[in-house]
Amino acid sequence: MASVIAGQVSDNLLMSSFEDLLPEHLLDVIAKLQNPQSFDAIDVCVRNEALQQMGALKDVSSAENVKPTLLQLAKLNLLWIPKEPLVQMSAGLKSSTLWSGVGESVLLALRDEKFPTPDKVIASLQPEHSIPQYLAMETRVMTYLEGFLWATSKAELRRFLIFCTALDIVQPFEKVKVCFNASHGLARAPSATTCSSTLTLSRLYVSQEELASDLRAVINSAQVHQFDVL
């Protein structure tokens, strides 16, 4: 992914990586917007809604302005915001030439959009069930996980994201995959792979309290602090 490539990243690679994250209906709108013959045929509300879903703060006036706007959105979503912890986002973005002249209110709005809340984090979860006979058990554990996220503190919610993704912000185009195993006893501790944003849980939990206890043990451990600098 473009955000982890060292050094200079070409505009073409940025655009390709950004488009890989977009759903098909947005790609269709993008293709039409970049064509001068079809630009005016797209309803303004449809155009604005599509651009807002990608993170744009204002409309584009012509087909010629679409590609520069998309490139700016690609830089925003792949290079800048993913690298900025919430506590540093405002200062980090203000120091970038990409945001020259952008007001503080816009920066705060961007930060708030990425700020984790229980509903945003839950919406980012993507359970990957194993076989049908385990579906009921795994669905129950997902219910426990959602209950934990609704009840947890803001600090622990951010640390949960750091544990799963190495970032303390919600990324609208990326999901946190939730996989399941049959671990039990001391081996039951939740685990995560941040490079693929994958959380692995035991399907053998029988209460939200059990899952919450194990999750708090791992997300509040000293090992999670190694991601705070990203």
Image (tube, grey):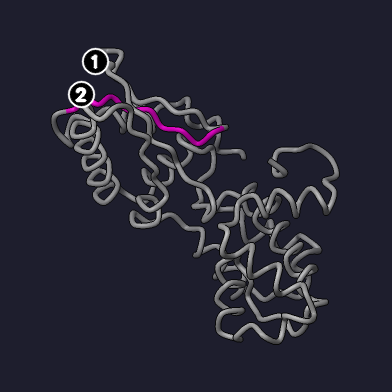
| Label 2 with label 1: CB-CB less than 8 Å | yes
Cα gap from disc 2 to disc 1, whole angstroms? 7 Å
Q: Say if the magenta span includes residue 187.
A: no
- Quadrant in which the N terminus appears: top right
Quadrant (top left, top right, bottom left, bottom right) of the C terminus: top right
Residue 104 location, x and y as percent? 63, 73
Range covered by the magenta-colored residues: 196-205
Report x, y in % for residue 108: 56, 68
Between 77 and 139, the one nearer to me in the picture: 139
145, 25: nearer the viewer:
25
Q: Quadrant of residue 199?
A: top left
Note whether 93 is above or below 44 in the view shown. Answer: above
Inspect the image, locate mark 2, and give the three-letter code of the amino acid beneath it: Leu
Specify the label residue 204 is tagged with: 2
Q: Residue at x 54, y 70 (%)?
A: 109
Q: Which residue is mark 1?
A: 184
